[in-house]
């Protein structure tokens, strides 16, 4: 696995940011925590880039709409379609937003990343784990967050 710096735990010789993904169920507070953390980091002088999945780019927002804007008379996307759309949006986000920001030394705070795809498409939809992992690897180019924060709340 490659860290956000692309160098694992070795010393960083070029400016590199920090990549943090927040994971958790709907209503767990990911967006709220990202906003609070971004404000605190900005007060300390850090460049902060926030993003969400799916979305975060023009292409990603269109793909998000395709996933979530189905009407009652439309057939919902198949699990495989969901997997590929999520990863198409992720590929665009990684290359257009996340990698350039990390290259500038920014802190990137992302509302969901590959952990959500494993949770929803593998555990929730039953797609084999090796298929989900392969799709995630293509989309991310091997990029992994430096830190993943899992927010858990009792659904009630």
Image (cartoon, rainbow, N blue to C red):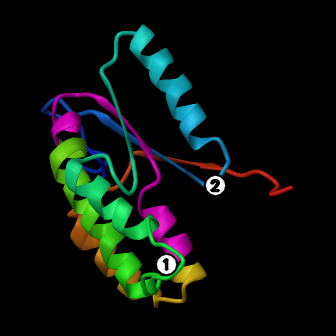
The answer to whether residue 58 of the structure is visible from this angle is: yes
**Residue for badge 2:** 26
Q: Is residue 113 left or right of residue 28?
A: left
Q: Residues within 10 Å of mark 1 (few under 14, many from 20)?
A: many
In the picture, the quarter occupied by the N terminus is: bottom left
Residue of label 1: 121
Closer to the camera in the image, 156 or 98: 156
Instruction: From the top left corner, tell me how far across and down residue 42 is, in percent.
Output: 40, 15
Does residue 86 show up magenta in the picture?
A: no
Where does the image place residue 25, in percent across and percent down from the top left?
A: 64, 57
Report which quarter residue 69 is drawn in: bottom left
Give the secondary structure at mark 2. loop
Q: CA distance from mark 1 to mark 2?
A: 15 Å
- Viewer-nearest of discs 1 and 2: 2
Residue 120 belongs to the span the image colors magenta: yes
Residue 143 seen = no
| Secondary structure of residue under mark 1 | helix
Asked whether the beta carbons under mark 1 and mark 2 sit within 8 Å of each other, the answer is: no
Is residue 154 found left or right of 22 in the rendered image?
right
Q: Which residue is more in the foreground, 77 or 125?
A: 77
Q: Which residues are magenta?
A: 100-121
What's the residue at 36%, 82% (across, down)?
A: 81
């Amino acid at each position: 696995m490659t860290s956000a710096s692309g160098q694992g735990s070795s010393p960083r010789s070029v400016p590199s940011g920090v990549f943090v993904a927040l994971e958790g169920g709907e209503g767990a507070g990911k967006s709220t925590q990202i906003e609070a953390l971004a404000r605190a980091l900005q007060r300390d002088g850090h460049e902060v880039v926030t993003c969400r999945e799916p979305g975060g780019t023009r292409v990603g927002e269109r793909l998000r709409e395709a996933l979530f804007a189905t009407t009652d008379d439309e057939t919902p996307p198949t699990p495989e379609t969901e997997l590929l759309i999520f990863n198409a949006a992720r590929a665009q986000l990684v290359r257009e937003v996340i990698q350039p920001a990390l290259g500038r030394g920014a802190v990137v705070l992302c509302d969901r990343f590959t952990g959500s795809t494993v949770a929803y498409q593998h555990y929730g939809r039953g797609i084999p784990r090796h298929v989900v992992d392969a799709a995630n690897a293509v989309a991310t180019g091997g990029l992994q967050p430096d830190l993943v924060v899992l927010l858990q709340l009792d659904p009630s």
